[in-house]
């Protein structure tokens, strides 16, 4: 399989965030370590998004917003106006693969719908068509391990909020813990992605 990896921009960019109290914090590491609740993300500099990035979004059959630290890995891409507009204007379906665990200092206490709400703040409401989330029942032992060692907790599928949304929820047992660590089952996820694509034909 041939793949192309594109950087968002060739510029040096500084991520900024405004807290719910109006404090502005500069830098990815500082945003995470501050442990604040945020209402807005932006760049200190005006990003010059590579044309290849928006072209790829325009030509895509499926746009997948994947897992990763929501505030400091995923959001930095979609807060760019050129990217968010390209996603909204693309004819492709938009899929979000939700994190299994929360990120300390970023998404403490977040459910699936909270992750989606953050993304929709920039790409627009009802732009995401489908959300993939894990419903794996983790053992108390591994939950306690992650809570103690990494201050992380499972991301819950908050059905009461999701039922009011327009996006489709695809849930499955998507996590493996055989080696004592929590990992996505990449084969299962790829199968769900392929099955969804086939349904759109």
Image (tube, helix red, strand yellow):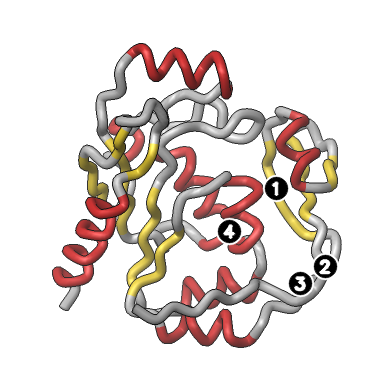
| Residue carrying label 1 | 40
Name the residue beneath numbered marker 4: 122
Asked whether the residues under the numbered discs 2 and 1 touch, taking CB atoms below 8 Å apart as contact, a structural biologist would say: no
Find the distance from the CA under tag 4 to the CA under tag 3: 15 Å
Residue found at x 36% / y 30%: 179
Q: Quadrant of the N terminus?
A: bottom left
Disc nearer the start of the sequence (4/1):
1
Tell me: residue 43, above or below residue 134. Answer: below
Image coordinates for residue 186, horizontal then vertical, percent:
31, 52
Q: Nearer the viewer, residue 69 or 148?
A: 148
Mark-to-mark CA distance, 2 and 1: 20 Å
**In the image, is 20 to the left or to the right of 176?**
right
Which of labels 2 and 1 is toward the front? Answer: 2
Q: Earlier in the sequence, mark 2 or mark 4?
A: 2
Report the side of 156 relative to 41 (left or right).
left
Mark closer to the chain start, 2 or 1: 2
Vertical placement of residue 92 versus 155, above or below: below
Disc 2 target residue: 12
Q: Earlier in the sequence, mark 1 or mark 3?
A: 1
Which of labels 1 and 3 is toward the front? 3
Pointers 3 and 2 in contact (C-beta within 8 Å): no
Q: Is residue 108 visible?
A: yes
In 3D space, how far apart are the residues under numbered discs 1 and 3 (Cα atoms)?
16 Å
Nearer to the camera, 113 or 107? 107
């Amino acid at each position: 399989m041939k793949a192309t990896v594109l950087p968002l921009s060739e510029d040096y960019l500084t991520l900024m965030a405004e807290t719910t109290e109006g404090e502005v914090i500069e830098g990815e590491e500082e945003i995470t370590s501050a442990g604040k609740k945020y209402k807005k993300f932006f760049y200190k500099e005006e990003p010059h998004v590579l044309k290849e990035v928006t072209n790829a979004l325009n030509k895509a059959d499926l746009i997948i917003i994947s897992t990763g630290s929501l505030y400091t890995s995923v959001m930095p891409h979609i807060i760019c106006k050129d990217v968010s507009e390209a996603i909204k204007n693309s004819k492709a379906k938009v899929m979000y693969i939700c994190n299994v665990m929360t990120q300390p200092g970023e998404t403490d206490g977040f459910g699936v719908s909270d992750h989606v709400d953050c993304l929709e703040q920039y790409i627009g409401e009802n732009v995401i068509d489908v959300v993939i989330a894990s419903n794996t029942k983790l053992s108390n032992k591994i939950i306690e391990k992650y809570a103690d060692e990494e201050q992380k907790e499972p991301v819950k599928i908050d059905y009461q909020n999701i039922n009011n949304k327009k996006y489709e929820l695809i849930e499955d047992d998507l996590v493996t813990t055989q080696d004592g660590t929590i990992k996505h089952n990449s084969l299962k996820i790829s199968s769900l992605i392929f099955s969804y694509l086939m349904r759109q034909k």
